[in-house]
């Protein structure tokens, strides 16, 4: 019974075409600005983490923590840069 119900629902051919509600262009503008600001902050954090890593390495105090900060900051930059594409692929 469950299998036949699932088969009938799957064969229904329901097509959903999502459309943005009125006024959503303002929200999309704010989201674009947020993404742009996040990328600028992430690049700044990457520069700061890289500078600290270079400073520590030059002065003989390199720790795994400073290298880890650079790695995590790079991961954050990649996530921010691909966020729109990832959400678009899921939708």
Image: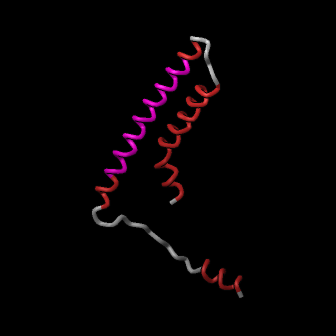
Viewer-closest of 58 and 14: 58
How many marks the image carries: the answer is: 0
- Residue furthest front in the image: 61
Residue 35 counted in the magenta span: yes
Assign the N terminus to one quadrant of the image. Answer: bottom right
**Main structural element of the magenta stretch: helix, strand or loop?**
helix
Residue 88: where, in percent of width, then height? 48, 54
- For image coordinates 49% across by 49% down, the residue present is 85
Residues in magenta, as a range: 29-54
- For image coordinates 44% across by 68% down, the residue present is 17
Q: Is residue 60 above or below residue 3?
A: above
- For image coordinates 36% across by 50% down, the residue present is 31
Viewer-closest of 50 and 8: 50
Q: Is residue 25 left or right of residue 85?
A: left
Q: Is residue 16 above or below residue 88?
A: below
Which of the 4 quarters of the picture holds residue 39? top left
Residue 87: where, in percent of width, then height? 50, 54
Viewer-closest of 71 and 78: 71
Q: Is residue 71 above or below residue 91?
A: above
């Amino acid at each position: 019974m469950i299998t036949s119900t699932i088969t009938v629902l799957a064969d229904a051919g329901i097509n959903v075409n999502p459309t943005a509600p009125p006024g959503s262009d303002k929200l999309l503008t704010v989201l674009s600005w947020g993404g742009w600001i996040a990328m600028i902050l992430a690049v700044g954090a990457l520069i700061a983490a890289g500078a600290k890593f270079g400073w520590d390495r030059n002065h003989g105090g390199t720790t795994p923590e400073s290298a880890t900060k650079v790695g995590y900051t790079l991961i954050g930059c990649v996530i921010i840069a691909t966020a729109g594409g990832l959400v678009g692929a899921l939708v």
